[in-house]
Amino acid sequence: MQPRISRHRSSLILGALMLSSSVPALAIDFDVRGTNVSVYGYAKLDIMYDTGDVKSGNSDGLGDSVNFGKIAVDGQSSTDGHSNLSAGESRIGVRTTTPTEKGDLVTNIEGDFFFGDFRLRQAYGAWNGILAGQTWSNFHTFISTTPTLDFTGPAGRDAFLRQAQLRYSFGNFHVALEDPSGVMSGDSFDGGYNASSGGESIAGTDVDRKDGLPDLTLRYESSAGPAKWSTAALLREVAFDSGGEEDASLGWGLFVAGSYSVTPSTTIRGQLTGGKGIGAYMKVNPAPAAYRVGNRLETIPAWGGTLGISQDVGPGTFNVSYSRVEADWDDAERDGVSLVDTDSAGGFVDAYDEVHELIHVNYLWSPIERVTYGIELAHAMRETVDHRDGSVDRIQGSVIYEF
């Protein structure tokens, strides 16, 4: 029996923890008039305890997943020792497959409860190389994903989110037009905390934002033996239009990702991501795509990476990953954008972040098929543009029951 458990272990754990690829590893299948219907999902309980620099006022610590905005830095009041239990990541999906003369017609509807109420994750159809609807961005790959229990997952890689798009696939190549105001686009630009003297800086986020063109993404993904790799590119317009003044800048992003199975029980994964104006297309990027000074937009450079290893040990898998993302605010500071917030007496209140760093260490095991237990330690650190820092350690245990 032990070899059979070993064969199931990796697919079971990845299916449960990689935020559900669009092909469920386990499902309830039945046929309706020639269409195969798969109902899949899981119930997940996360038990979390945070210790370190938790910003005062956050009774649940870092929340249901690591949130850098809830980490206090030098000069901010903090609290220590917060517990939180959540089942919000639990999800359900329905996938249909209908054979046709030109290949399968596939549809997928999926949602979860991560923000309390039911949330649409995926709603798309695909046929003859054309995908239409909401699903993972084309600027995304699962290849470099080291499994974590934390829903945020490794930083410094593609943002791992979903948005509306029209995609065409041919072989290993994929090209898509994506929603410029979708969740991955995030904040388009920022003007700092306060308007500078002379009115050069326009304080606030996305003031007069305009989404004039869809985002263009291109991806190539392939494998050979124990190696898998993926690379992708992004082009986007960042723009504002006040009705009297307007400006636009071109943003871009790139990533290269890969994994290599050193042995049947050992896998190394990594990804490098960066760009100018990449914004929220990179996971937990401290900066939006651009900053605004007066009637001018300037894109912000940012880069990051992640490296991880998975090793089968006993009945489960031991995973370790390190990730980091950094944004370059130097031009914004030279242009007078207010990046440090102070009170009326000149005391420190908060500042824009420059660096986010994450370490995940976990052990995941499956005593039987469809059941996964896990324990994880995560270390999250943020550093601001004025070089203040803070960190929080999170201990997390999870139970996952799949169907």
Image (cartoon, rainbow, N blue to C red):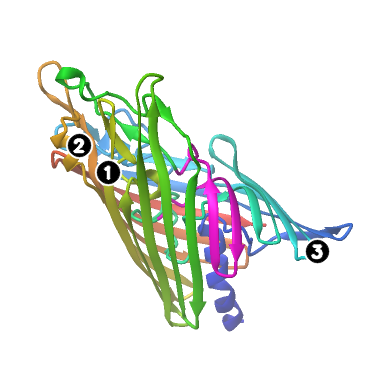
Q: Quarter of the image containing the C terminus?
A: bottom right
Let me know if residue 107 is in the magenta part: no
Q: For this rendering, which residue is in front, 115 or 185?
A: 185
In percent of width and height, residue 357 lies at: 27, 52
Q: Is residue 108 above or below residue 223?
A: above
Please give the range of residues in magenta. Answer: 158-184
Q: Mark 1 sits on what residue?
A: 300
Between disc 1 and disc 3, the foreground one is 1
- Decide if residue 311 is in sight here: no
Residues at marks 1 and 2, CA–CA distance in whole angstroms: 8 Å
In percent of width and height, residue 78 lies at: 23, 33
Q: For this rendering, which residue is in front, 312 or 353?
A: 353
Between disc 3 and disc 2, the foreground one is 2
- Decide if residue 270 is in sight here: yes
Could you tell me if the residues under marks 1 and 2 are in contact, i.e. CB atoms within 8 Å?
yes
Q: Mark 3 sits on what residue?
A: 99
* Sequence-earlier tag: 1 or 2: 1
Residues at marks 3 and 2, CA–CA distance in whole angstroms: 54 Å
In percent of width and height, residue 333 lies at: 16, 36
